[in-house]
Structure formats: C-alpha cells, structure tokens
Amino acid sequence: MATYWKTININKSWDFNNKRFKKAKTESSNRIIRVNDDLLNILSELKPNNTKQVFDSVFGSVPGSGAVNKVLRKVLKQAGISIIFTVLDTRMLRYFCIMALMYMR
C-alpha cells in the first residue's frame, strides 16, 4: 500500500497571557510538517466535537507544558518505555511520540 503525504502548516503560537493564538515570533518558528493519512486519522479521533483545536485543556484552552508532560509520562509508562524526557525534548523526536500514540491505539 502506498503512503501519501500531506502537510500541516504551523505558523502560530499560543499566547498564555492573552489566551489566544498569535503570529510566530520569527520566520524560523514556522514549520511545515509532513504527515500521512494514518496520523491525520488519529488526530481526527482526538479532536472533540465543537472545538477549533485538537488538544484542549479542561479550561477550554491550550494545555501548558506541565500538563502535556504529565500525559506524556503516563503514555510512555503504559507503553513500557522507561526513557524520561519532556515535551521540549521531543522537538527532534516527534515521530517517536506519534509511534507511542499509535502503539496505545
């Protein structure tokens, strides 16, 4: 089966003080990420009804890094992965996180 790639453009960041999205600080902050249909299907399953974003906190905004790290530790433990790292460490390991999500599926 052939894999068809699509892209997701990341050109905004979350302003925690004003609770809204804002333009990325620098041009180098913008990202184009190649994704396949498998990942898009997983993301569509994660997206709750009537929200504009895939990941929402219980307060209806973007979750902070502490909350994301807590969930990441839980998923890694459930997957039997003993390496400890934070979301910031995953910049180079985003595909590892995707694979962990797919494993938990």
Image (spheres, helix red, strand yellow):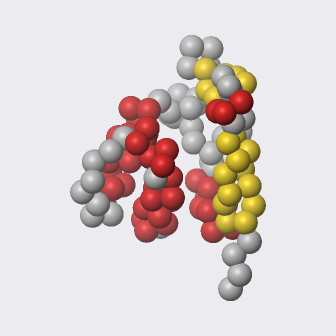
Q: Position of residue 34 (x, y in %)?
A: 68, 57
Residue found at x 32% / y 45%:
85
Q: Quadrant of residue 13?
A: top right
Q: How many marks?
A: 0
Q: Residue furthest bottom?
A: 1
Residue 16 occupies which quadrant of the picture? top right
**Which of the image's four quarters has the N terminus?**
bottom right
Say which residue appears at 45% left-offset and 59% top-offset. 96
Q: Is residue 23 left or right of residue 82?
A: right
Residue 71 visible within the image: no
Question: Measured along the vertical axis of the image, is residue 9 above or below residue 23?
Answer: below
Residue drawn at the location 61% of the way across and 26% of the way down: 14
Relative placement, left or right, of 62 versus 35 is: left
Q: Is residue 104 above or below residue 31?
A: below
Furthest toward the front, the residue is 28
Q: Residue furthest top?
A: 17
Q: Could one spot residue 56 in this view of the protein?
A: yes
Instruction: Please state the horizontal and vertical placement of residue 87, each as a whole percent of the image.
Output: 43, 41
Q: Is residue 19 placed above or below 91 in the rendered structure?
A: above
Q: Is residue 34 above or below residue 1?
A: above
Q: Position of residue 55 (x, y in %)?
A: 57, 42
Residue drawn where x is 67% and y is 42% of the image: 31
Query: Which residue is more in the foreground, 48 or 100?
Result: 100
Image coords of residue 11 (percent x, y): 72, 35
- Farthest left residue in view: 82
